[in-house]
Structure formats: C-alpha cells, structure tokens
Image (cartoon, rainbow, N blue to C red):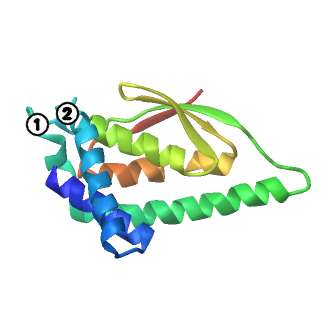
C-alpha cells in the first residue's frame, strides 16, 4: 500500500504545486485516505494468471510511468478530434457501439483499460462483464483506437504491454 500512497502524494504535489505544510499535510492525508479506501480493490486476487498473486505486485511501476504520458497524449489527440468534429459545419459524427473481448490477466488490467477508454474524449465504457466490454464511440476514428483489422486496438495493446502479457485480444463490432 505504501507505493500507492507515495504515487498519490507525488501526484498531489505535481498538481497542486504548493509546498507549504498545510497543503503537504492535506495531500498526505488524502493519499492515505484514498489508499485505505481502495485497499479492498488492491486485495482482490487476479481473475486470470498466477495463483493468488497480489494485484499491486503485477503493476509494473516503471512501465506505468511510460503508460501515463502515452495516455495523456491520446487524450490530447482525442480532444482535438472531438473539437474538430464539433466545430465542423456538417458535424461528421458516426456514433457506434462496440462490443469486444479482451483477455487481460486480471481485474486491475481490465479496470485500467475501461478507465483509459472513458478518459479519452469521444469514447465511453458503458459496461464490462468479465472480458467483454461495451463502448460507445463518437466517430469511426475513435473506434479504431479500440479495434483494428488485427483484432487489437492500440489502447488494448498498450494495456496488454503495461501488464506484460502476450495474450491476444479479440474484437468484434456490435
């Protein structure tokens, strides 16, 4: 739980930019409260994978430092795409519901994918049932980040590589 507290506290410092005792104290207290409040999630065993591995043990902290900037860049690109669609005179939206399966190694990896999809403008995760995701995409291009001809979208690929799994993800349109 200590790595999570340190990560949350560091994130607090980066976002707040305040270094006085009051703000550092509030940041530390918030990090501890969030870690305690989410410890039940962190104690869940993975649904697939090695027997009873602790999910925090499967989080590759160094690879996560590479994933976060990649996700931020995807959010920027998607924001620009949505802005172009909204200001375009013909509003070329092509809303789609996508249903796809992915074989991520545990619930934490599936949660990472679902959250990443929802954080990216133009896509929203509507439902997750086991390995099956239901996602709304605003445009064809935003849908392509989730699916591709090879059966694996770039976001799924990034989450798969984040958790160092070589299982294939399979997709299908609804």
Examine the rendered structure and indicate whether residue 46 appears above or below residue 28. Answer: above
Across and down, in percent, residue 59 comes to 22, 51
Q: Say which residue label 1 marks.
A: 50
Across and down, in percent, residue 31 comes to 28, 54
Q: Residue at x 43, y 67 (%)?
A: 15
Q: Nearer the viewer, residue 129 or 98?
A: 129
Q: Quadrant of the C terminus?
A: top right
Q: Residues within 10 Å of mark 1 (few under 14, many from 20)?
A: few
Across and down, in percent, residue 165 comes to 24, 47
Examine the rendered structure and indicate whether residue 38 appears above or below residue 65. Answer: above
Tell me, yes or no, whether the two marked residues, 2 and 1, touch with CB atoms within 8 Å.
yes
Examine the rendered structure and indicate whether residue 99 appears above or below residue 87. Answer: above
Image quadrant where residue 39 sits: top left
Residue 25: give its label. Answer: none
Across and down, in percent, residue 35 comes to 25, 46
Image quadrant where residue 2 sits: bottom left
Q: Residue at x 60, y 63 (%)?
A: 77
Image quadrant where residue 51 sits: top left
Q: Nearer the viewer, residue 171 or 137?
A: 137
C-alpha gap between disc 2 and disc 1: 8 Å
Q: Residues within 10 Å of mark 2 (few under 14, many from 20)?
A: many
Examine the rendered structure and indicate whether residue 103 appears above or below residue 33. Answer: above
Q: Is residue 99 visible?
A: yes
Q: Say which residue label 2 marks.
A: 46
């Amino acid at each position: 739980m200590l790595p999570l507290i340190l990560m949350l506290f560091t994130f607090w410092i980066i976002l707040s930019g305040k270094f006085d005792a009051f703000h550092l104290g509030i940041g530390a207290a918030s990090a501890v409260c969030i870690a305690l409040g989410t410890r039940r999630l962190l104690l869940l065993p993975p649904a697939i994978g090695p027997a009873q591995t602790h999910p925090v043990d499967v989080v590759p902290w160094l690879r996560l430092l590479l994933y976060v900037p990649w996700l931020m860049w995807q959010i920027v690109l998607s924001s620009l795409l949505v802005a172009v669609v909204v200001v375009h005179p013909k509003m070329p939206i092509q809303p789609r519901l996508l249903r796809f399966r992915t074989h991520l190694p545990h619930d934490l990896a599936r949660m990472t994918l679902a959250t990443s999809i929802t954080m990216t403008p133009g896509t929203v995760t509507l439902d997750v049932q086991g390995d099956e995701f239901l996602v709304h995409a605003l445009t064809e291009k935003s849908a392509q980040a989730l699916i591709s001809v090879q059966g694996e979208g770039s976001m799924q690929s990034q989450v798969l590589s984040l958790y160092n799994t070589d299982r294939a993800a399979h997709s299908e349109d609804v």
